Amino acid sequence: MDMRAGAVAALVVLCSSCAVHGLALKEDRRLDITAPGDRSTVSLPVEITWTGSAQPASFGVFVDAAPQRPGQTLDAPFRGSRDCLRACLDRAYLANRNVFATTAPHVTVRHLNKAPSGQTEHFHEVTIVLLDAGGRRIGEGAWSVRFRLRSEG
């Protein structure tokens, strides 16, 4: 076996041990966020809209917050925090943190956190996930866009 063939064989063996299993690496096109446009500049209130073929019981919408893991409810990221001692799935509690559950393909966001001091390019991020009838996240699919507020620079 010449040196090249040996190197290729070694590379194949090494790369096969690094394979990723169980991850959804295919682009999921079931939803399309139609507003705001990715990296657009908008004013408050921000109307978030989407279209698509997904037919979940409802949608989870997160603005500047990470969504829950698959199989968890919307309040999962807040459990254990000092201000979430009881029923955090209360819509008012979640809306105050820009987390929404909706059956409609739109949400209006009326307030956002300010840009950190001294930051001139501060983007906000909206992420939409699918929810089952129990309010639990369905699968790993998530759709996101980033936008900036007109008054933040």
Image (tube, rainbow, N blue to C red):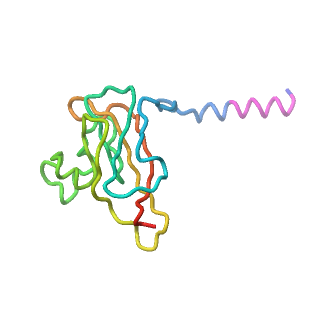
List x then y, in percent, for residue 54.
Answer: 36, 27
Identify which residue is drawn at 40% across, 44% down.
35
Please give the count of numbered marks on the rendered protein. 0
Vertical side of 9 occupied by 106: above or below: below
Q: Quadrant of residue 129?
A: top left
Identify which residue is drawn at 28% across, 52% down.
98
Vertical side of 51 occupied by 92: above or below: below
Q: Residue 2 versus residue 147: which sits nearer the camera?
A: 147
In this image, 132 relative to 126: left or right? Answer: left
List x then y, in percent, for residue 16.
Answer: 62, 30
Q: Quadrant of residue 11?
A: top right
Magenta-highlighted residues: 2-12
Identify which residue is drawn at 29% across, 52% down.
109
In this image, 96 relative to 50: left or right? Answer: left
> For residue 82: magenta?
no
In this image, 110 relative to 149: left or right? Answer: left
Q: Residue 7 versus residue 132: which sits nearer the camera?
A: 132
List x then y, in percent, for residue 60.
Answer: 29, 40
Identify which residue is drawn at 48% across, 68% down.
120
Q: Quadrant of the N terminus?
A: top right
In this image, 6 relative to 150: left or right? Answer: right
Q: Main secondary structure of the magenta part?
A: helix
